[in-house]
Amino acid sequence: MTNSPISLRTALTAAALLPVVIPAVYILHLKRTVSKQTTTTSGRRSSKHAADNALPATSSTPWTPISLPPEVKDDDSQWVLAHERVVSRPIAAAMLSPPPDSPATGASSPSQLLMRYAQATHVAFGKTPQAYAIKASISEPHLRQSFDEAVIRDLSFRPGDMVNGVYKTAYHGPGETPVSERVELVIEAPASYKGHVPKGLIVAEIIVLDGLEAPAKSDSSQEQLVVFVNETWMWRRNEDPTTLIEGAVGGWLHAVMAGWLILKGIAGVRQ
């Protein structure tokens, strides 16, 4: 890429730091709002070889994404794998439009509910300062157009679809259980860019619960409920600098933003 005032590395590394440019009072208000409606877990894959302790290893690693590179998935002696998972409180399916529905077998795109939810989260992200920074680092016209709200609202999230410049749909299908559905998007640099790019992927997922599976504190213990999930996975070689979500400050801010995006996504599908 030429004549770019902001490097893609700088833009992507700052991709979760929106709150830094917002007054502290607002950050705390946003954190309280997000905390009341979501829960967050984060950590790092356990490895007896890793010496870095930026994040503690955890035994509660989420289900491994389908689109995680095989070399990262299979070799914990060379790769540090960090994860963050933000989950909404259960919401009555009757309050959602469109309602949850299993996609057709072999469908190339998500169900309407997951599609609209993912669209709403990416529309929200596309209006943030970090999205503007990423866009400023991209020269390819078709990738710059992928930030436009009208384009995102029309996106089907089929494998290969790009959104917000650097996120490429890599997988759509079930998650860990048959009642979950997800789309996974990997960070992919523009073809013209030759510099370093953070290695990572994001997940948007919906999980349908029946009354018996609902938590005791949920809004209903009888009707069908839905939870919405955002996951972030980042990986690096052992000797590389820590990823954004491994840091205490970066991880905290990223979780707040991920929760905010969940709320924006839910607002996009709530009646």
Image (cartoon, rainbow, N blue to C red):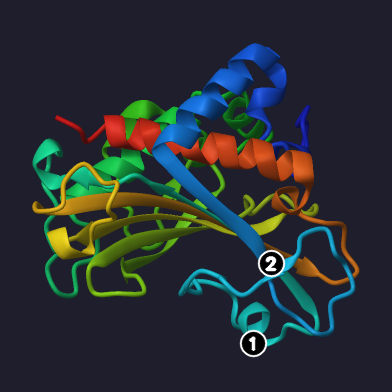
Taking the spot 69% from the left edge, 16% from the top edge, the residue there is 24
Taking the spot 77% from the left edge, 60% from the top edge, the residue there is 55
Q: Is residue 16 left or right of residue 6?
A: left
Disc 2: CA contacts within 10 A as few (<14), some (14-19) or many (>=20): many
Q: Is residue 103 left or right of residue 145?
A: left
Amino acid beneath label 1: Asp
Report the disc number at residue 74: 1
Q: Quadrant of the C terminus?
A: top left
In the depicted view, which residue is nearer to us: 16 or 223?
223
Q: Where does residue 130 sit, x and y in percent of width and height? A: 63, 30
| Disc 2 to disc 1, C-alpha distance | 15 Å
Q: Quadrant of the N terminus?
A: top right
Q: Please tell me whether mark 1 sits on a helix, a strand or a loop.
A: helix
Taking the spot 52% from the left edge, 40% from the top edge, the residue there is 258
Q: Is residue 45 left or right of residue 151?
A: right
| Res. 21 image quadrant | top right
Closer mark to the observer between disc 2 and disc 1: 2
First in sequence, mark 2 or 1: give its number. Answer: 2
| Res. 46 image quadrant | bottom right
Taking the spot 63% from the left edge, 36% from the top edge, the residue there is 139
User: According to the image, label 2 marks what residue?
Assistant: 44
Residue 174, relative to residue 110: is it above or below?
below
Q: Where does residue 229 sit, x and y in percent of width and height? A: 40, 52
Q: Is residue 146 visible?
A: no
Amino acid beneath label 2: Arg
Residue 8, relative to residue 187: is it above or below?
above
Disc 1: CA contacts within 10 A as few (<14), some (14-19) or many (>=20): few
Q: Where does residue 43 sit, x and y in percent of width and height? A: 66, 62
Q: Is residue 77 visible?
A: yes
Residue 108, relative to residue 261: is it above or below?
below
Counting labels gives 2
